[in-house]
Amino acid sequence: MSALSRRTVLRAGAVGAAAAAVAGSLPAAPAHAARTDIGVSVYPFPLGAVTLLSGPFLANTGRTQSYLSFLDADRLLHTFRLNYGLSSSATACGGWESPTTELRGHSMGHVLTGLAQAYASTGTTSFKTKGDYLVAQLAICQARATTAGYNTGYLSAYPESFIDRVEARQSVWAPYYTLHKIMAGLLDMHLLAGNAQALTVLTAMASWVKFRNDRLTLTQRQNMLDTEFGGMNEVLANLYQLTENSNHLVAAQHFDHAEVFDPLAANTDALNNYHANTQIPKAIGAIREYHATGTTRYLDIARNFWDIVVSRHTYAIGANSNGEYFKAPNRIASELSDNTAECCNTYNMLKLSRQLFFTNPARADYMDFYEKALYNHLLGAQDPNSSHGFHSYYIPLRAGGIKTYSNDYNNFTCCHGTGMETNTKLGDTIYFHSGDNLYVNLFIASQLNWAAKGVTVRQDTTFPEAPSSKLTITAGSGTFAMRVRVPAWATGATIRVNGTLQSGVTPGSYAVITRTWATGDVVDVALPMAVVREATPDSATTQAVKYGPIVLAGAYGSTNLSALPTLTASSITATSTPLQFTATASTGTVTLLPFYKMHGQRYTVYWNVTTTNPLPAFVAHYLFNETSGTSAADATGNGKTATLAGGATWVAGRTGNAVNLSGSSQYVALPSGILAGASAFSIATWVRLDAVTNWARLFDFGTGTSANMFLVPSSSSGTARFAITTSGSGGEQRINAPSALPTGVWTHVAVTVGGGVGILYVNGAEVARNSAMTLTPASLGSTTNNWIGRSQYSDPYLDGAVDSFRVYSRVLTASEVSGFHSAGL
Ligand SMILES: [Zn+2]
């Protein structure tokens, strides 16, 4: 069945206000939403508009769809029916769904969402049929609420006395958490599978929620919120957006947990010892309450939460939590156990990342995180050897850990549930749209039918096994901007349109290609990967190894480990198998595999790395005397070969040749970590500027706009400047020269920083100094974007020639600098 007919099926299935969906143009919000989301400028495509093509994501989807087809609806309904005095001869489920488990019924919600998503993605009616049956049977239960002794609208697999207990602060697991899953599943059955009865049942549940909570005092409600309640605020805000019934917003706001929201609104990290997956859905609720109300405090809460969790509480695989709890900020190496990285947390962090990106698409880092956590955590949390997509709960991050998985009927953990959701919506974030803009966020083999533009885009890729992707307009034509995410890790990334190299391709941003597209147009995205190591914030020697964005773990078979193996970093060597490496460790020779492919054996994600060679005093020297090719040799013999990028050329230089940069997309990329750990440095070089453009970089070493150091021939003040920062432009420590660098003549420029003093030299003479420079390259960590001629920001590129570029890990003396100038070295 084609993608178009899938959408037709969906439209036919959507009732009532679905008429608001104009044929041929995709709605900005769900087809029958009464209220427009406030503060949103980017939108997802319907699930049915994106078809996954062959690859690991499609394989995961197939296994979960098989499981959803296999599941016996009556076994899932068993405890619900018993709770309403109905007979059930079905075999009870086990695990967290057993008839005596207080969380029973939660999986019903996950299954409803999974079925709705599977139907919306594929149009396969059996998913909808099963979902419709579950909804109808739940409606029968709910209709018997008063008969069973419950309040009207109550729908659960456990008695309403559980709610009494949570209100009375008596011991009970998480009753509202369970109800949230059911409510979210009903909403999805309505929105994605056009089930009208689901909305009726959901609305009655929402009215019951409001009834239960209206009668409590504010203090009682806030005390109750200490018990995990999932995304009650989210689903009720979503229901408000759908129906415009303000009662649902009132009910949503009953779940605004002040104890958690207040510090977040103040951007304070108070998460230590809070249950992680209890808090993440609150932040998702907050961003949806912002979209519903426009109250920016909700946006602050959600955005600050994401920033805090991602920067201070996240492992290399994009996951968080140890034993389900957040720990003190920056505790990572000290929190490696068998109970790390609960999968639900990352499922929810991805949901939050998506909503924040809808709110601020200028932040490519939301989607960089999405890629990191999707590939390194969730993709590999499903067991590929299970035809039913059994799923992990925790992902052990201790050395010697091994992934374990759920089963058909005797597990039903929360993560088994969110696994069903994750793996039925893997196409939902590859592409977004906004007016005449198409966002390409993820490099996953897929086909998009952009109905509003009458355009079909096919993405062919085996990424990350190959560091590239090809987007082809396979049908239709029209003018729009294709915005392709250039990952922050992708130093040297290039984009070609029908073979023509594009400018403005900057890692950590979206490259914008605006043109009148025609069938057959091809966009080639090259994303060079390199082996990098990521140290933990609490232990510089505890490091994960990555190739591009992919975490590589050591494969240890059945061998358990009692401590982190010590890795000889220089020994990491690629094999002929994509993404597979070998290395020497204290345990012997070890194979490194992508962590998402690590199944059925013990592994280590983190290593002890003590073999870092101290930087040589003279780190690198680029004479640029080559005459062809794109490699620039390092004359020190240290092997720090640089790469000409963006079409940079060779030209006659100060002595021999030089590298020539045109002022448009051309630059030189130096190796990652070239000054990593250096507590002092010097850079000395010759430059002949063809033009001076404010903010064009002579050099810029960094990892993005937060942490970097750069030298510009002219700032907006019209004078040359060196700056170093670990906190963006507002935190820069600067050396400002009295004038800009000249054009048309070879000029010697040097900067030295060390011992708290930074000095800028032009033509062998000091022109400026700053005696309060506390930042050094060591402050920046191991930088990945080390460029001559290019900025971390979207600044102009350098227009001119560069020759004899020297990098030192020490402070050059004034006489050394003047000697280079006078001797023309
Ligand atoms: Zn979980």
Image (spheres, rainbow, N blue to C red):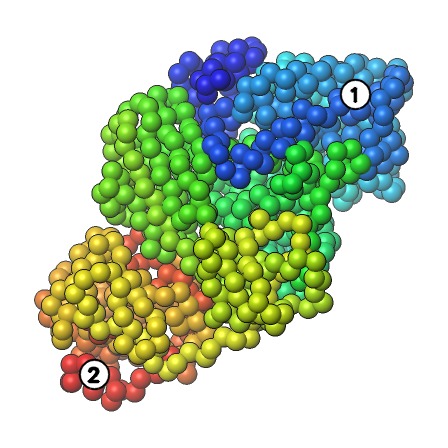
Instruction: Tell which residue pokes out farthest to the front in this image.
Output: 576
Q: Residue at x 37, y 53 (%)?
A: 528
Ligand 1 within 8 Å of disc 1? The answer is no
Q: Between residue 229 and residue 36, name the one nearer to us.
A: 229
Q: Residue at x 88, y 22 (%)?
A: 82
Q: Is residue 581 left or right of residue 825?
A: right
Q: Residue at x 40, y 72 (%)?
A: 675
Question: Where residue 799 sits: x, y (%)?
Answer: 18, 59
Vertical order, 819 against 468 (above or below): below
Residue 74 is tagged as: 1
Residue 285 is tagged as: none
Vertical order, 355 against 332 (above or below): above
- The amino acid marked with disc number 2 is Phe
Q: Is residue 765 left or right of residue 291?
A: left
Residue at which label 2 appears: 820
Label 1 vs 2, first from the N-terminus = 1
Secondary structure category for the residue under label 2: helix
Instruction: Tell which residue pokes out farthest to the bottom in this image.
Output: 815
Q: Is residue 38 visible?
A: no
- The amino acid marked with disc number 1 is Asp
Q: Between residue 406 and residue 518, name the one nearer to us.
A: 406
Question: Where residue 565 sits: x, y (%)?
Answer: 63, 69
Q: Between residue 712 and residue 476, name the one nearer to us.
A: 476
Mark 1 burial class by Cα count in 10 Å: few <14, some 14-19, many 20+: some
Secondary structure category for the residue under label 1: helix
Question: Where residue 635 sits: x, y (%)?
Answer: 27, 76
Vertical order, 263 against 24 (above or below): below
